[in-house]
Structures are given as structure tokens and as C-alpha cells.
Amino acid sequence: MTRIGALLCAGLLASSLAQAQPQVLDAGRIGQGLDRLAVLGSVLYIAAHPDDENTQLLAWLAQQRHYRTAYLSLTRGDGGQNLLGNEQGNGLGLIRSRELLEARQEDGAEQLFGQARDFGFSKTSAETLRAWGQEQTLGDLVWAIRKFQPDVIITRFPGDSRAGHGHHQASSLLAQEAFRAAADPRRFPQQLSEVQPWQAKRLLWNTWKSFLGSGDTTEPGQLQVDIGGFNPRLGLSYGEIAALSRNHHKSQGFGSAAQRGRLMESFALLDGQAARQDLFDGVDSTWSRLPQTQAIARQVERLQREYDSAAPARSVPGLAQLHRQLLGLPAGVWRERKLQDVQTLLLAAAGVWLETTADAPRFPAGSAIPVRTEILLRSAVEVSVLSAGEHRPLQIDQPLRLSGSAHSLQVGTQLAIAGQVLEVQREIQFKHVDPIRGEVYRPVQFTPPLTLTPSSTAYLFGDDHSRRIEVRVHAFADGLNGVLQPQAPAGWRITPEQQPFSLRRKDDELTLGFDLEPEAHPQNGELRFQARVDGQVLDKALATIDYGHIPAFDWFPPATATLVKFDLKRGGERIGYLAGAGDRLPQMLRQLGYQVDELKAETLTRQSLAEYDAIVTGVRAYNVNPALAAARTQLLQYVEQGGVLLVQYNTLAPLPAEPLGPYPFTITRDRVTEEDAAVRLLLPEHPLLNHPNPITEHDFDGWVQERGLYFASDIDPRYQRLLGMHDRGEQELSGALISAQVGRGRFIYAPLSFFRQLPAGVPGAARLLANLLAK
């Protein structure tokens, strides 16, 4: 599949999965839709990540000005952090993608995605463009512009250091290049069999008064627009709509307060024709931009003038006439868009409820899905279902249920409303009643026939002992008999070499165990799991994402795990872990031989803490758990009595008023983003760098994504600074690992990214962490 094809498929798949329940338009939203029929203008907003978008501006453009509005996120946000659970990488990217799609349901904009990889924080656009592949990402952006055909393009960021993140800078630089490239038929000519060159009127940068401490970027002479105000049809201000939209970014902790009243936004011209009074200066956003559409414009005006919010069904004949008129237009973006809008309004005004459901959420790929389509008419409008060449009239409040089967995840139903035949597509849904949440929908998905899910994504061997590993085998079809065979790199013994299994019914599950033992000189690498079933080789795992703010869904990563053997000595045995925003460190520590108990800050006592050699706080623990601040006295007393307290990274806010440690230091945004950045041992003789494992620069080989983040600064001299590191071209930072002796124990602030390194199987990170946990 081409890169462009992959982009389209990814976008369509994500959109379908997000629409977990058919949206019903009330009378106010029908009125909004009628107003939108008169507007033929479009805006494309471009930035790097989920949550970069200006949700109030999107809401105002879509709901007040009625422009077709879309946000293009060049990445899925898979390199960020996760406040909800322990998903990282692709799993987090899927969560954040669906959060974006749910956010757009609130603010009325559309959502588009690029294919660039979020590889974590970057400090320069040059690094970002190298990692993304500048020409490939530019091609994706050019395709999006040619496909969407925006009149105005807006970037969230400038292309320089004021944007902060290198991804932010790169998103603007690419938008600036794509603005011209999209109009040039010599650029990406392979796209022109499906789309045509397109020149937007202008490219603007949405400047700000304040953004992540970067200062005021507004200037006299910039275009200013008031995006405040109240929408009486929706009963909300645009700031209130924006807050509802932004609150869907729960994995990033981006819940926000609603803004009400006047709000000025500023815009700087980056390219194209300047705007003096309005974003759409010089753009005809009426029907007159298309030839021979005067009758359509008059019909839209009549629908708006005669709309009765107490009786929306009275608009059905006029909407049906408009539908006929639109069908007579030549093919084009606006014809297709307005036909879709009119169909939505016809269904809503006629009071038609239509959904298609299945009795299970998962079906093997290639199988037929038994489905039931339920149609309910809630007005006196004449509506018929076209089935097998016959018209079946609907009766008010008498559901019509149609049974059938489907080989795709969408089902089409033909309806006749006021003489117009509509092909209504619905995603197949599975719904059930949850005793807490009520009626819950989730998308139906195709699955492999069978999945193989190892108990961990990495197995760390710090010694030569054999270890039991387990694989969960799940059937998505009846009558599966096969053999599971692990495949390890050279130097590993697996017992038994393979195991047969038999699963009689769909959703049967069993767990198979294997003994894995390193031999002499084992090779580190990938442990693969494959099952042979009826001549097929199956090698996918099952991962389910189920948080209440987005529809539940499954995804199927490769059935693999990282396998690593290295020399490790432990200086402690029993660890107490105070969970933070979610990471897999407790599981990885157990693999290294530690006994790990997950504790609650509310129940800590002097006696309970005394049982542990070390206490570890999870990533962002002080940000998400206010009870930790109240436990400060007990934790520091534990340290004074000889314990080790290891605090992983926290962000700047919210933080307790008192210092996290015994002496002051400040948490900053300082970080080292280059995973291969040189590391200097500032105190090479310090016990934490020597006991029980001698640490050298080689222990920092093979790290992934970054060295660390939210380093300490303004450090009290009673702390010792153990490591120095810096990204290329920057000054050395010494706040990545600080330690202070307190009584007979030790306090450590270690914002190194252990939460990424150990699940990735990085030996040096595990050795250093073992030293920090040792007494």
C-alpha cells in the first residue's frame, strides 16, 4: 500500500471507530445545519499533536461562521505520557487519536491525521524533519490540502524556537512549504490521478498572548478576531464548547475551565494574500462561487427563513427539493459535502432513528457478521425502506427490524423520504447495558482467528536462572486446534519447544507456560510466538483499550517480547511502590527478582514503611495523588531511619507546596531528548554509581526516546549531583540524578526515563536502578 493509501485507511478507520453511537440532532442543531448549508468556505488548522489545537477557534469557525473546519494532527501523540494507564507508544497513540475524534464531536470540526511518528520531545525542527522524513511528511500534508481544498490554512505554531517543541516548529515549516507545493502540479504528481492541485487564499499563524511560558507573540497590525460569544441554538458559549472538547484529552490531563465572554485571537500572515478585516477577506464563501447555483441559494434561504424549531418535519419537503437540485450539480467537493449535510438533516427532520448492531464486538476477519438494523420513525413524514425492490412504509413509533449479514464493518440501508432515495451508511455496533454507565456502545471489529498474548513485552534476566513465561491464547472462532511454538534468539533454551492446544468455542481462552533459560552467551533479541492452525501461521497479540471517555476497542500488536540477559546484582529485596500516572516499572522490577508491593499513600504508617528496603514513587505521582503530600512526614522519617526513597519525574504542576525531598530543589522543563546523548559521571566514586553494580558510560548505550525529563534545578547544596548530560549544542545539565543522605537513609530524585527503558529491555537502566534501590 502506498503511503497516501495508508494515510487514508488510517484516517477512515479511526473515524469509524470513534462514532460509537448514532448522533441525534435536536431542533437547535437542525437549525445550525440549515445555516451551514448557505456557507461554502473551509478552514484547515494544522499542528503536530493531539491537544495542540485551539478548540475554541475550531468551535467558533464551525458553529458560528459555519465553515467546514478540520484539524490536521501530523502525529498520533504516541511519544507522550499517559495519565490514564500504562499504555505507551502505539497504544497511547490509539488512545489519543480517539480522544481527538471525540473532541471533534463536541466542537463540530472534522479530524484528519498524518503519519509522522511522535518520537518524544524534540528541541529542533532539523531533528524532527530528519526523523519524520521531510519529503514523505510534506507529501502527506500536500495530499490533505488537495483533498480538503481549504480556503484558509492556519498553523498553531511558528517555524522557529518560539514554538518550543521541535515537532511544533516542523509542523509550521511543513505547512508553509505545502501551501505552495499543493498548488504546483510538478510536486507529488503521483497524487494527481485522485486529487488536483489546490491553492489556498492565505496561510496564517494563530499567535498567542501566552503559551507554555513562551511569551506574547501578538503584535500590532496582526488580524484580530473575537471568538467569544454565545450560541443560543446550542445553549453554550464557544468557550464552553471548547472546554467540553478539550476535556476529552484525559490521557494528557487537559481538563479545562470554560471561558465565557469576549476573547480576541490574533493571526499573523505567513503566506498568500493578506487579510485586513476578516479571516475570509477576498474569499467568496456563498453559493455564487459555483456556477448556476442561484436556485440552490434561493432554496437554502427559503429553508432557513421558514424553519420551525417546534416542527422540524415541516422542512422535509424543502430539504428533499434541495437534495434533487444538488444531484444535478457536477461532481466536486462542495456537491458531495452538501449532499451529505442534506441527508443528515433529512433524517433528523423526519425523525428517523437508524442503527445497525451485532450480538458480539469481535468477529474473525473474512467471516460474515450477523447484523440487525433497527429503524424507527418519530414523525408523520412518509418514509419507506427499500428492500428487495419493495417499499416498506414505516409506521410512527413502530420499530422495523431487518436481519442480515455483512462482510464489512458498515451496512447500507436505502430509505425513501419525500421522493428522495438515500443510502444511509451505519457502522456496525455492539451495545450492552452497564449497571453504572447505562447503555454502552463499542464498534464491532474484525480480528485474527486467534491471538497469542505474552505476559510481558520484555523479559529481563539479571542472572542465569530459568524463568516461567506464560502466553494467553484466545480464540475468536469455534474449533481451533493448533500448536504454539516460541522462537528465541540463539543461546536460549525453551521447554517444551512447542505445545498443542484445543479451543472449542469462540472466546475460549487458555494460558500456556514455558520455561525459558539462558545458556552460555545468549543473544539478546526478540522472542516470537507463533501458532499453526489449519496451515495458517498466526502471530498477533491482543490488547484492549477500555476507558469510559472513548469507545472500547482492541488492537493487535505482534506477539513478541524483548529478551535480554545481563549481569545484575541487587542490594535490596523488598520494594514498596506508590503508583503515579501509570507505568510498568513494578512488573519489570519483579522480573529482576524484587518483591514489589503496590502501596496506598493514604494508609502509610511508620511501621508499614519499615518493612521495605526502598520506596519508589511512580511517574508523576505527586501530580496525580494529593495524598502523597500528606504522607511527606512519614516518608522522610522512613528515610531518616535508614530507608531509601526514590522519586521519579514529576511535572511542574500540580505539586505540593512543600519540597518533595528533605531539602529544596525546583522541578523544571529541562530535559535531554537525545537518547544517545553523552553522559558524564560527575562523582564516579559515589556508592550509587558503584554498588552493587559498577556503572560506566556504557550503561547508557541503547536507551530509547530520551535520557530523562523534568530535571531538577536550584538544587540545595546538601544534594549530590551524580550525572551530567546535554543535547547537542547545549550546556550540560546536572539535575538528572540527585541524592541526599538523610539520617541513616537516602532521598533520590531521578527523573531519568526508567519507565521507558526497562519495558524496552535496556540493561544499563536496570543496573543503575538496582543501585538506586540498594541500601
Image: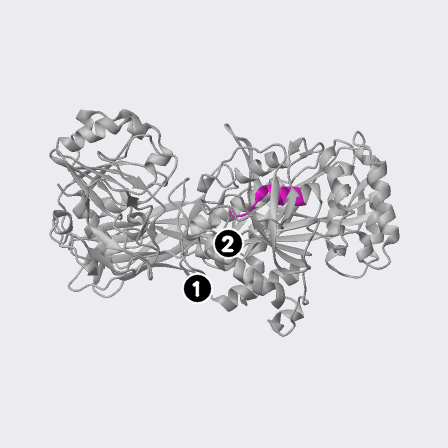
Instruction: Give the x, y percent position of residue 192.
Output: 66, 70
Residue 380 magenta-drawn?
Answer: no
Q: Farthest residue toward the bottom?
A: 186
Residue occupying image coordinates x 63% and y 32%: 261
Which residue is under mark 1? 126
Q: Is residue 723 visible?
A: yes
The residues bearing labels 2 and 1 have C-alpha atoms spaced at a distance of 15 Å
Judge left or right: residue 335 versus residue 114. Answer: right
* Image disc number at residue 529: none
Q: Is residue 407 visible?
A: no
> Residue 651, how many percent across, how many down?
36, 41
Locate the N terminus and report the quarter of the image it occupies. bottom right
Where disc 1 sits, the SS reads: helix
Q: Is residue 93 above or below residue 307?
A: below
Task: Count the labels in the image.
Answer: 2
Instruction: Check disc 1 and give the amino acid type.
Output: Ala
Residue 481 vs residue 681, the one in the foreground: 681
- Position of residue 655 measured from the top left corner of the image (x, y, whole percent): 35, 34
Secondary structure at numbered mark 2: loop
Q: Nearest the camera: 121 or 450? A: 121
Q: Is the magenta stretch mostly helix, strand or loop?
A: helix
Disc 2 + disc 1, Cβ < 8 Å: no
Q: Which residue does the image show at 59% across and 54% down from the upper left?
A: 12
Q: Is residue 572 above or below residue 501?
A: above
Residue annotated with mark 2:
48
Task: Name the residue at 33% across, 30% down.
Answer: 657
In the displayed structure, does residue 297 sit left or right of residue 410?
A: right
Label 1 Cα neighbours within 10 Å, binned few <14 / some 14-19 / many ≥20: some
What segment is highlighted magenta in the picture?
52-61
416 or 638, which lies in front?
638
Mark 2 burial class by Cα count in 10 Å: few <14, some 14-19, many 20+: many
